[in-house]
């Protein structure tokens, strides 16, 4: 996972943007501890997304693959997980829809930030 160290700046920038998007969707006061945990979780997500971007095949074009990586991660994992959680809590479908839109926005923002800033593949890749 040396690529995480090599790409610390774009990963942390992506995490910060993700945190801002979440604050726009769910404006509430956060104390230091939960805020730090949320930021760390966004940084981990960005690190995994960076790995997906680094190994994505470039056949469809660099930006097409980048955007589609965010879309596939959102539709394939984050939105279904949100729907499952919402159904288990008996939350409304509106909450699921808004949560899905938020996760799609977060992942697309992460992809855009990291691709714009630039990612460095690990040695030997």
Image: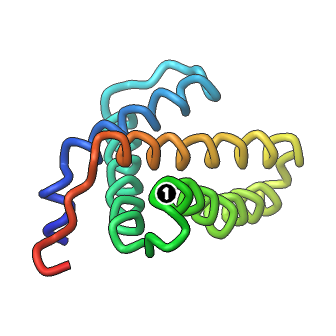
Q: Residue at x 56, y 57 (%)?
A: 64
**Up/down of 70 relative to 30, above or below:** below
Q: Nearer the viewer, residue 64 or 21?
A: 64
Q: Position of residue 31 (x, y in %)?
A: 38, 25
Task: Tell me if mark 1 has few (under 14), some (14-19) or many (20+) residues whose alpha carbon lies within 10 angstroms of its own.
Answer: many
Q: Residue furthest right?
A: 93
Q: Where is residue 8 in the image (x, y as percent from the top left)?
A: 19, 49
Q: Nearer the viewer, residue 82 or 66?
A: 66
**Residue 61 relative to residue 31: left or right:** right
Q: In which quarter of the image is the C terminus?
A: bottom left
Q: Residue at x 13, y 57 (%)?
A: 6
**Residue 12 relative to residue 52: left or right:** left
Colouring used for the render: rainbow
**Residue 77 relative to residue 107: left or right:** right
**Up/down of 78 relative to 13, above or below:** below
Report which residue position mark 1 lands on.
66
Q: Where is residue 39 in the image (x, y as percent from the top left)?
A: 35, 40
Q: Which residue is drawn at 85% across and 54% down?
A: 90
Q: Position of residue 16 (x, y in %)?
A: 36, 33
């Amino acid at each position: 996972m040396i690529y995480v160290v090599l790409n610390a700046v774009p990963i942390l920038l992506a995490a910060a943007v993700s945190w801002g998007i979440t604050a726009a969707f769910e404006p509430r006061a956060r104390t230091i501890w939960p805020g730090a945990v949320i930021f760390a979780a966004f940084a981990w997500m960005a690190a995994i997304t960076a790995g997906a971007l680094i190994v994505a095949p470039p056949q469809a074009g660099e930006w097409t693959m980048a955007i589609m990586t965010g879309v596939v991660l959102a539709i394939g994992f984050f939105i279904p997980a949100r729907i499952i959680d919402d159904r288990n809590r008996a939350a409304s479908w509106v909450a699921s829809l808004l949560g899905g839109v938020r996760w799609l926005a977060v992942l697309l923002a992460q992809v855009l930030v990291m691709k714009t800033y630039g990612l460095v593949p690990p040695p030997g890749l």
